Image: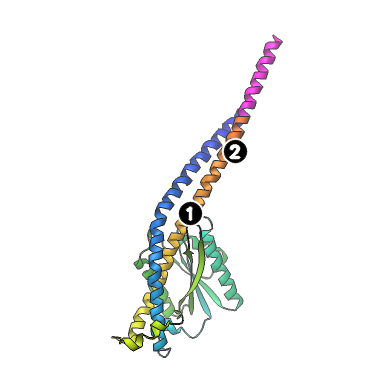
Amino acid sequence: MASLKALKIRINSVKSTQKITKAMKMVAAAKLRRAQDAAQNGRPYAERLEAVMAGMAARVGGVGASPLLAGTGKDDVQLLVVATSERGLAGAFNTNIVRAARRKAEELQAQGKTVKFYLAGKKARVLKRFFPNAILADHDMSAIKAPKFDDARVIADDLIARFERGEFDVAHLFYSKFVSALVQDPVSQQLIPVPMPAPSKAETSVEAVAEFEPSEEDILDALLPRNVAVQLFRALLENQAGFYGSQMNAMDNATRNAGDMIRRLSIQYNRTRQAAITTELVEIISGAEAL
């Protein structure tokens, strides 16, 4: 009877867990659509800004350019900005981002570079176990429910200030790009100094049809800090959409696994119960025959 009671407790416990995972799946699915739209809507602006800057930077040239564009002239100290979620229960979502950052850090250290970390998200703090003396900053994002541009600008301003103080030479951003509800790809991009892709013909031809007031140099100096904030904002939006997609799938798998476990435990419970009833019947019949 004790084993029957234990099985019943386990079945009820798994059923309670199943209700929780099912509810979490529904919540994640409801939030995914809005987060997905925000991430997808943010991409064209970020990509267009980079393209405009590429064209302007190509015409301005590197002479007298802002350090955010020209860099410090060296790459001895590399900063890895690792953006993760604040919560878990999302499968390998955060683990994949952290793993990509660790792999990059090990590659840079093998090249003789000094590696530092800027953590943005609670789940990035696992890096403290592997690189306890390399954490430059741990930015608290616990109060952020839905990322806003101002949230990204706070991080960008802090990074730029640290860059201007000479705390690092190159910064790389790590986050997870949202592909679909089933696929989230951990990616990295150079954040500081701002990398300039090859400008398109449309961008290089702007000089022939437009004059800039103020000068292109002044506009570029104003756009460079904003671009850092925009790229960070894009990363936060991509992360949020990826987190909800990954959590929805993880909770769906957990709900189905709980259902399988309930079925197995129910079969075991019924067999144990039938065996106990059979034993009692045999004892009653044996006692009656003895009389």
**In-front residue for pair 97/80:** 97
- Residue 264 disc label: 2
Q: As rendered, which of 124 and 89 lies closer to the eye?
A: 89
User: The disc labelled 2 sits on which kind of residue?
Assistant: Arg
Helix, strand or loop at label 2? It is helix
Is residue 258 visible in the rendered structure shown here?
A: yes
Q: In this view, does 261 lie above or below 291?
A: below
Q: Which of marks 1 and 2 is nearer the N terminus?
A: 1
Tell me, yes or no, if residue 131 can be seen here: no
Query: Marks 1 and 2, Cα distance to the nearest angstrom?
Result: 25 Å
Q: Is mark 1 on a helix, strand or loop?
A: helix
In the displayed structure, 117 sits above or below 14; it is below
Residue, x 59% and y 32% (percent of image)? 269
Q: Which mark is residue 247?
A: 1
Q: Which of 109 and 245 is in front in this view?
A: 245
- Which region of the structure is painted magenta? 272-291
Q: Do the residues labelled 1 and 2 touch (CB within 8 Å)?
A: no
Kindly indicate the quadrant of the structure image that contains residue 157.
bottom left
x and y percentages locating residue 105 in the rendered image: 56, 72
Q: What residue type is labelled 1?
A: Gln
Q: Is the magenta stretch mostly helix, strand or loop?
A: helix
On whether residue 21 falls in the magenta region, the answer is no
